[in-house]
Amino acid sequence: MTIPVDIAALGARAAAMIEQLGAISSAPDNLTRLFLTPEHRRAADLVARWMGEAGLAVSEDALGTVRGAWHPAGPDAPRLLIGSHIDTVVNAGKYDGALGVILGILAVEAVARGGLTPGYGIDVLAFGDEEGTRFPTTLSSSAACAGVFLPASLAAMDGEGISLAEALRAYGKTPDDIATSAYDPSRVIAYVEAHIEQGPVLEAEDAPLGIVTAIAGASRLSITVTGEAGHAGTVPMRLRRDALAGAAEMALAVERIARAGTDGMVATVGRMHVEPGSVNVIPARVVFTVDLRSASDASRRAALTRFEADAHRIAEQRGLGVVISAFHEVATVPCYHDIQRRLGDAVASLGARAPLLPSGAGHDGQAMAKLCPVGMLFVRCKGGISHNPAEYASPGDMGMAAAALIRFIERFQQPHYNGGTSGAQT
């Protein structure tokens, strides 16, 4: 069965919904919508209303994830999950996360009203804690759905000293009920997410949509370089132990490693603290961070090994001390090959080309991969800009994405995947 699609109409509806959801903010002059805040509540209520108007049965779990259920084969049938998040960073763009929820609603509404009767159901999910902006946690909503929520996260506190547990109670939830949020893995087929690319590749390729091959793994390091403070005018260059010069050389080393890397490797030195920080004193101590990402865990680990060797070599040559410590580690999540193929076929059926590319940013799929196979559809965004008010996806591209999801659903036919890992072959 082929459901008629009007790409322009779907895009216009998506654009209107994006504007409506983007108006819900804690700030009068920018979009800021943090997890478990009054603004999150208003956004969740709006999404729930849209789900209801689309003919979905609406519920909300103990972590605040809004769920819209369409179960034509009955509540006990296996189900496909489609979703994304509705929380934002501070001073955010309107499309990150929200677009995936809106596209899921539009697609399921179309197939339900088009008379499709598959042997599986669909749940559209609106998660609330993907960005990790309010609390030093991330993916707690999707982790609860996947059955891997860490109870220790409940003690995490925001900048005002409010714990996640306290915020949940204020939101009307009971932390003891979190375990009930978990899906039964035997009744879930897969998780699929549509998301803006947050990068410039699709625009450079002149392609409206892309198929994600993997969500990149990430390692974050804190590097402390110690030297010796001295007078900026009296210590000869050959006798200096300048911690900042050494740190700068190490930063260039990790950049060089990433440039030579494979699997979409990127490296960023995003923070550098210099002591004593005086204009006329040679820096004695520098602490800087490295964020290294790759779509291959093997290539990422090899790059980390090379960087550590380079950092110690640089320190020794300059008479410096260096200590490297890892404070964040997330494994690569490969997208399921069969889902990649099916998404590609759906896009091709619309006469478009969808390049394959990795995601350098993290997504709820990283948590959901612990429940079931995952797949992602990227939507072109202007200039590759994200986490910024200038973030933008055109109505035409959003309409194409909604139509691709519709084609994907109508052709899905409940495949039987072996196991719950997203990297499995079929």
Image (cartoon, rainbow, N blue to C red):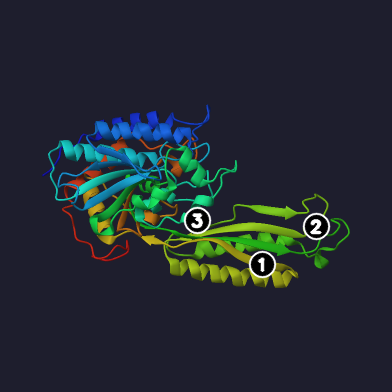
Residue 261 image point, x, y percent? 48, 65
Residue 223 image point, x, y percent? 64, 62
Residue 277 image point, x, y percent? 77, 51
Mark 3 burial class by Cα count in 10 Å: few <14, some 14-19, many 20+: few
What's under tag 2, amino acid-wise? Ile
Disc 3 designates what residue?
152
What's under tag 1, amino acid-wise? Val
Secondary structure under the numbered disc 3 in the rendered image:
helix
Most extreme residue toward the top is 28
Side of 168 where 270 appears, left or right: right
Residue 282, disc: 2
The residue shown at (30%, 58%) is: 372
The residue shown at (39%, 48%) is: 177
Mark 2 or mark 3, which is nearer the start of the sequence? Answer: 3
Mark 1 or mark 3, which is nearer the start of the sequence? Answer: 3
Query: How far apart in space, not on screen, are marks 3 and 2 (Cα)?
Result: 43 Å
Disc 1 designates what residue?
323
Query: How far apart in space, not on screen, are marks 3 and 1 (Cα)?
Result: 28 Å
